[in-house]
Image (cartoon, rainbow, N blue to C red):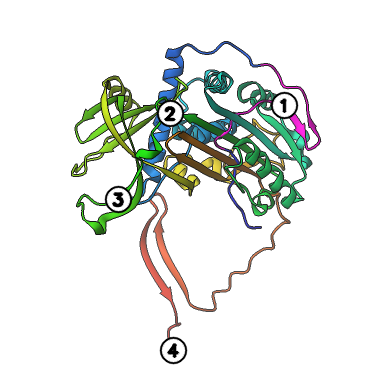
Amino acid sequence: MKRYMILLLVVLCFCFSCACNKKGCDPKPEAGAELSNPEELSTFADLNNDFAFRLYAKADTKGKNLFFSPYSISTALSMAYGGAKGNTATQMAKALSFSLPEAEHHAAFRDLGNHLNQIGKRGKAEMSIANGLFQAKLHEKLLLADYRKLLQESYGSDIYSLNFNDAKGTAKYINDWVLDRTNQRIKDLVSEDHIQGSNNGMVLVNAIFFKGKWLEQFDPKATRKDYFYVKPERVPENGKPVELMFRQGEYAYGEFPGFQMLELPYEEKDLSMLVILPDELSATKPELNPQNLNTWRSKLNTQEVKVYFPRFTFDLDLENIPGMLKSMGMVDAFSDVSADFTGIRQPGAADLYIMDILHKAFVEVKEEGTEAAAATAVIMATKAAPGPEPKIPVFRADHPFIYMIIHKPSGALLFLGKFAEPPILK
């Protein structure tokens, strides 16, 4: 059976918690503890940013647009991490920068989620997060009580039991859930083939949606058609048409070796857009890491700035997330042999591994403000059941073959040959 590697995590939406099937939900538990103090949340954010910058470096392709939600990806993978054990958990923690003790780690995700949800309640911006676990009804009784509790208390997760044998219907149900929680922006995150390929597994989803107005909006009458240059030389053949917005006003701004940084604030005081603009002739790129970002932000000064900024809209997929994570050392989680997610379901014939990670994102920037949404899906597949006892093979070397003499302790090949024709008998 064709396999798709999938732990479904859905981006750009923030959610709530309940235990559900298709017909309804049980009451959700109340949010647990007080929010972490600012210093603790800052430390936690630095860890997540470290992963974000490393993932960015992996995904960055010269001349190609890139947009994704590292928060969504981290959240969805953290839900899976909550059920990982042994070497699988160790590799995930290293690759994803999950450095806090496990209890503190999940509490930090809970507290950050609570902070973000408060933004939406204040009314200055639309902000919503949603998490969900969509499991095969066939194995719903195998879900461990402790894992259910973790998802509900730390991630406010909905829990659904669906008929994965109806792959088309299950994919539609999940996609409708994502669509509803991203203001109709993220469509068709998972396919019928993903559900079918999961072998009655499960899908973990995080969705995030944001819409906010600039604190000082751009005047549409000042927007002009211009060129966006893809190479340093400002000649017509290097320019591509763009709509440039313009505003002159007071902004937090800084100049650094090789680049400028500008902060565009939203009406919601807790949110802003940071823009790093490399010098056209600079031979080096700004080194993106949490420490540098904190330093640059601390050196911004409020001053009068003339701002030209393009209007744009993108729908983008972040491709090959499994490949990028494997290159960061997260290998076992994707193996149907080595993966250990025994903290999610009772061990046995229904053991899980990550088949794939899907991520879609949307962003629109215009004079009034910004709208952005994303969804991450982590598809966890059930390992195949053992097959019948194999027949004893027959090795009949009656046709050309390759042979070698190997030094076993080192694996070094001492001799290598091909037998293509027997010698003449005397």
The residue singled out by tag 3 in the image is 227
Question: Residue 146 is drawn in which quadrant?
Answer: top right
Magenta stretch holds residue 14: yes
Q: Is residue 317 visible in this depiction of the protein?
A: no
Neighbor class of circle 2 (other Cα within 10 Å; few <14, some 14-19, many 20+) is: many
Above or below, 380 against 387 in this view is above
Quadrant containing the C terminus is bottom left
Residue 246 in sight in this render: yes
The kind of residue tagged 3 is: Tyr
Q: Name the residue under label 4.
A: 426
The residue that label 1 is drawn on is 18
On the image, the x and y values in percent for residue 290 come to 35, 27
Q: Residue 214 carries which label?
A: 2
Residue 38, position in %: x, y?
44, 13
Residues in magenta? 11-30
Q: Distance between the residues labelled 2 and 3?
A: 24 Å
Secondary structure of the residue carrying tag 3 is: strand
What amino acid is labelled 4 in the image? Lys
Label 4, label 3: how far apart the Cα atoms are:
84 Å
Q: Which amino acid does label 2 sit on?
A: Trp
Q: Type of residue at label 1? A: Cys
Q: For numbered disc 2, what is the local secondary structure?
A: loop
Mark 1–mark 4 Cα distance, whole angstroms, equals 83 Å
Magenta stretch: residue 248 in it?
A: no
Residue furthest to the front? 221
Is the residue marked by circle 4 packed among few (<14), some (14-19), or many (20+) residues within 10 Å? few
Q: Is there a contact, CB below 8 Å, between mark 4 and mark 2?
A: no
